[in-house]
Amino acid sequence: MLNGHFENVAFATEAVDLFLREVKDIKVLIVNWWDQVPEELIPEIFAGAGFPGWDTEHAAITETSVMLYFAPDLVRKDKIIDDQAKRIPKYSIFPAPRDIIPESGVLYKATYGSVEKGEKIVKRVTDAIVEIVKREFKV
């Protein structure tokens, strides 16, 4: 299972746990794409902006870059902004209060995104996922 949304980690894990209670003799992998970004690529991707942590990288540098790479015609470049929550707690709150999610939905500096960064992210993450599949499924 390829997870593309930080907030889904717990729900994906629970879904797999429930599934494996019913289905035996199967291996399930949950791969969070951001965990496959090599550490040495992070300073390059976040140059000039700083790395805020993956939990606040929503609709920001990496996701904007990946969309610019995959589907530039769907990116409304005139709407790309830098934004940030008024506060960033190191714990989860349900439901999320308004001051931890900006109205824009952008949690960091989307203007630092680029096609070139998107290409590097996609290629490196794809290579990592291919290696995981080969290793875990003996392909």
Image (tube, helix red, strand yellow):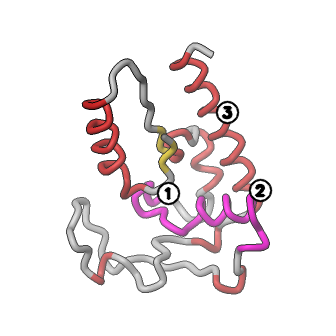
Give, as a single range, the part of the protein colored magenta. 52-74
Residue 36: image x %, image y %? 54, 39
**Circle 2 or circle 1, nearest the eye:** 2
User: Does 8 sit left or right of 94 as displayed?
Assistant: right
Q: Residues within 10 Å of mark 1 (few under 14, many from 20)?
A: some
**For the residue marked with disc 1, what is the amino acid?**
Phe
Is disc 3 surrounded by few (<14), some (14 to 19) or many (20+) residues within 10 Å? few
In this view, the residue in front, 57 or 48, is 57
Reply above or below: 65 against 15: below
Q: Amino acid at mark 3?
A: Asp
Q: Amino acid at mark 2?
A: Glu
Q: Where residue 17 sits in the image (x, y, percent)?
A: 28, 36
The quadrant in which the C terminus is found is top right
| Residue on which disc 1 sits | 51
User: Which percent across, then down, holds residue 39?
Assistant: 54, 39
Residue 131 is situated, as x and y percent measured from the top left of the image, at 61, 25
- Gap between marks 1 and 3 measured at Cα: 22 Å
Q: Secondary structure at mark 3?
A: helix
- Say which label, 2 or 1, has the lower sequence index: 1
Drawn side of residue 129 relative to residue 69, left or right: left
Residue 71, by quadrant, is bottom right
Residue sitting at 26 percent across and 39 percent down?
A: 18
